[in-house]
Image (cartoon, rainbow, N blue to C red):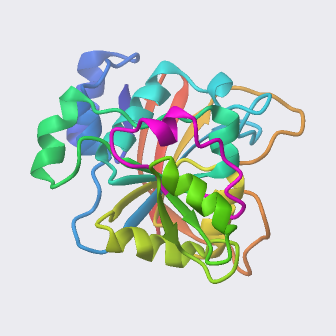
Amino acid sequence: MRRLFPVTDVTDETAAAEGAAGREWSLAELAAAYAYPEGPAPWLRGNMVSTLDGAAQHEGRSQPISCPADMRVFGVLRALADAVVVGAETVRQEGYRPARARAGFAAAREAAGQGPAPAIAVVSASLDLDFSLPLFSSPLVPTLVLTGAGADPERVAAAEKAGARVVVAGEGAGVDPARAVHALAELGHTRLLTEGGPRLLGQLIAADVLDELCLTVSPMLTAGEAQRIAGGPSVTLPRRFTLSSMLEEDGFLFTRYRRA
């Protein structure tokens, strides 16, 4: 892993000492590189991967366009978060499991007042979810289900019976993104991470609640008709983000953009 941006004297000296290939960063170094900003306000970051031609998935899954370094960053981002916000379709397609505790982050999470692992917060209007899955039946910390006030009472009861905590974050059947962020913050989850999918990320962008995007650029081409990292209706004016950092390993770029 090499730091490409921001460029400093230390960056140049490190690159010269390590050579073009760099070295594998420790978990502590990655955690420092991706630390959340200080402050009580909620901070929502997204983490997505995209190929050179803009595909966020291959054959419906993101794993084929990822790499081991991307999965290390994925794990670190989860370990830093209070809660991971994910869409119901992604839960179904990716076979989501509960977040696990990681020994390397146990002391840091305890010092930060966090639980042993982040809570998974599933956004779903229909609650068309398999509540027998480990995500709901055996998480380390209770899974949250974000839905609207008009959700089917029977599905709400099924979620709660499975052990999930249902959080109302919308007046109708759907979820209001701004209200979802506020509801999670009220539960003490201010360091938020979303892993998509594209439809949910598009909704968060449209609602102007995304503060940061961690985008892995995969050196692959897939063609086809795969989704982009964000879908749904376009915004009135494009949102401008500023490059905060860029790392590289094996041709993969690990970029971090913050709202301008």
**Which SS type dominates the magenta stretch?**
loop
Image coords of residue 212 (percent x, y):
46, 60
Image coords of residue 53 (percent x, y):
77, 38
Q: Is residue 197 left or right of residue 143?
A: right
User: Is 44 in front, or is 92?
Assistant: 92
Where 118 sits versus 211, above or below? above
Q: Which residues are magenta?
A: 123-144
Going 34% across and 37% down the picture, which residue do you hit? 76
User: In the displayed image of the protein, which residue is found farthest to the right?
Assistant: 224
Q: Is residue 211 left or right of residue 189?
A: right
Where 182 sits versus 32, above or below? below
Q: Is residue 90 left or right of residue 260?
A: right
Residue 45: tell me if it is visible: yes
User: Is 219 in front, or is 98?
Assistant: 98
Picture quadrant where residue 10 is located: top left
**Residue 130 belongs to magenta span:** yes
**Residue 42 belongs to magenta span:** no
Q: Is residue 190 left or right of residue 121?
A: left
Going 50% across and 33% down the picture, which residue do you hit? 134
Where 223 sits versus 239, above or below? above
Picture quadrant where residue 29 is located: top left
